[in-house]
Amino acid sequence: GVGGVRTVITRQHELILRATYPHADAELRGMLSEQLVALLDSLLSSYVAQLTSLRRAGQQERYVTLENEYTQKRSELLAPLLELGQHQWVAALAEKYCDFDILVQLCERTDNQSRLQQYMVKFADQ
């Protein structure tokens, strides 16, 4: 809901990226990036847990709705880290949460065709 944990984490993500990160020095940016990644990991894992629960309960309609929300949110939350050049963090989260689009963008930005080939093999069945 409006005051739920996902909403709060999403808002915190926005605040860090808009208000704090641009004015931070390199050391603080490193700490902020780590904190953002921890927040995003927590948020995305909550989606995965809920999706798993809905699938087991056979609630297909709610599952599809939540899966669409999750897919959209995942990219919206990871894209800013990619823009900031936080490639290792982006790769770790995108691999963990199977965001192939973000991984492709990462490989294009870093001109890493061999890594792209690895991802294509790894995520071929998804």
Image (spheres, grey):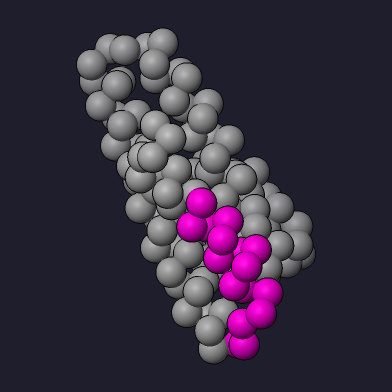
Q: Which residue is at a point 56% across and 61% down the rendered structure image?
A: 15
Task: Specify the quadrant of the image occupied by residue 106.
Answer: bottom right
Q: Position of residue 65 (x, y in %)?
A: 47, 19
Residue 107, compared with residue 86, is above or below; it is above
Query: In the visual, does 77 lie left or right of 48?
Result: right
The front one of 78 and 109 is 78
Q: Position of residue 83 (x, y in %)?
A: 71, 62
Query: In the visual, does 102 lie left or right of 50?
Result: right
The front one of 23 and 117 is 23
Q: How many marks?
A: 0
Residue 95 visible? The answer is no
Query: In the visual, does 15 lie left or right of 111?
Result: left
- Confirm whether the magenta stretch covers residue 21: yes
Q: Point out the image quarter for the N terminus.
A: top left
Q: Position of residue 104 (x, y in %)?
A: 68, 50
- Confirm whether the magenta stretch covers residue 118: no
Q: Main secondary structure of the magenta part?
A: helix
Residue 64 visible? The answer is yes
Q: Which residue of the protein is positioned furthest toward the front in this rendering?
A: 3
The front one of 71 and 113 is 71
Q: Which residues are magenta?
A: 11-26
Q: Which residue is at a point 61% across and 73% down the rendered structure image?
A: 21
Q: Which residue is at a point 43% across and 69% down the rendered structure image?
A: 35
